Image (tube, rainbow, N blue to C red):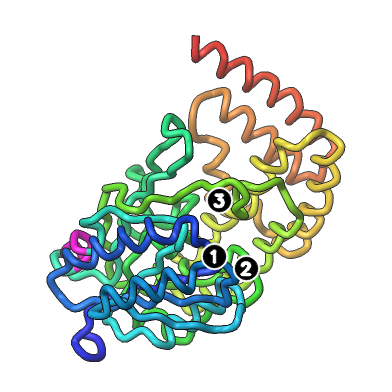
Amino acid sequence: MGYNGIKLSVIIPVYNTSAYLRKCLDSVVEAVSQVEEPVEVLIINDGSTDESPKIIQDYCKKYPQFLKQFDKANGGLSDVKNYGLERANGDFVIFLDSDDYIEPSMYQDMLLAIEKEDADIAVCDIKLVYDDDSLNRVWSCAVPARTGNFAKVIDMSMMPASWNKIVRRSLYSGLTFPVGKNNEDVAVTPIILGRAKKIAIVEKPYYNYYQRTGSIQNSAFNEKRFVILETAKMCEERIKELDEEKQEQIKGSVYLHQILSLAFYPIRMEKFKRRYELLKKYMEQVYVMYPNIWENFEIKEFITWENWFVRFYRRVSVHLLKHHNLYATCVFWSFYNIALNLYQQIKRK
């Protein structure tokens, strides 16, 4: 048990999210109320200029038994996470974004899974929530085809997320989130997963990940997203403490789901001129920073998955990118985007 007998610390970074904060806090209050052991909720105001501080204050007055308010100068998401970890007292810790919300039994069920399986980490599925409910979908936290829970969890595109994982706090020892950079979880979560002796998988969509307009992931493509190359490089350096098999599995996941996926999806969808400019700038950095990316087993497997249509796209894309044929890649993607649109229209009919 952690300090003062606290089982779980929930860390909620807050910056100008007053429009969503009440729903978030209502959900965490309900979830914490169901946990049988002591829980603390650290709500950290990162220099908000809207009504967020007042909302936090109101909730902390109403639920002083487990809600704690902290106010600090604005330092960004990584800075808040580090701040929260330094002050967390729980044996286990989890993060919660202040524009998201959780299901009532999330924490209790995940803690029970940890206890039952004697695990260091519990991971749950994610529900992507849109303003249009018809777009909502569930994102699994594990790949069933893989062998072993580490491999199943590490091979997911949303693997780095820190908010669908309850983690033994000691696993964060010596690790900090990179201040001032987005995609901060990529530099930390894979190492946490690699350090765990056992991971419990809870296949229920307990975390509601709100896809709000204007968020980093849902706004127009910006070259600032190239920062993934830096956080991925930090991850690559940090995983050297792990055994070689885990290192290769983590590299494969990060190379495929974080680095190459930025080219395969958001950059591919840009108009041709912009697509080529972005791809050229991005891949020039990839070639220098990750010269052996094409030799990783995950990339080699990637081109063999899914149906023939998807395999064809992947094989050609990887071949062209591997041989630095960036203009040809953009031309191919133009034809593929047209074909994909037609294919989807036919499937809908």
The disc, 1 or 3, on the residue closer to the chain's N-terminal end is 1
Q: Mark 1 and mark 2 in contact (Cβ < 8 Å)?
A: yes
Amino acid, disc 3: His
Q: What element carries label 1?
A: helix
Mark 1: give few (<14), some (14-19) or many (20+) Cα within 10 Å: many
Question: Residue 231 got which mark?
Answer: 2
Q: Position of residue 98 (x, y in %)?
A: 45, 63
Q: Mark 1 points at which residue?
A: 186
Specify the farthest residue to the top.
Answer: 349
Q: Name the residue under label 3.
A: 257
Q: Mark 3 and mark 2 in contact (Cβ < 8 Å)?
A: no
Q: Where is residue 47 in the image (x, y as percent from the top left)?
A: 58, 77
Image position of 74 (left or right of 192):
right
Residue at 78 percent across and 62 percent down: it is: 288
**Magenta span contains residue 142:** no
From the viewer's side, name the closer residue of 199 and 96.
96
Image position of 64 (left or right of 317):
left
Amino acid, disc 2: Thr
Marks 2 and 3, how far apart in space? 13 Å
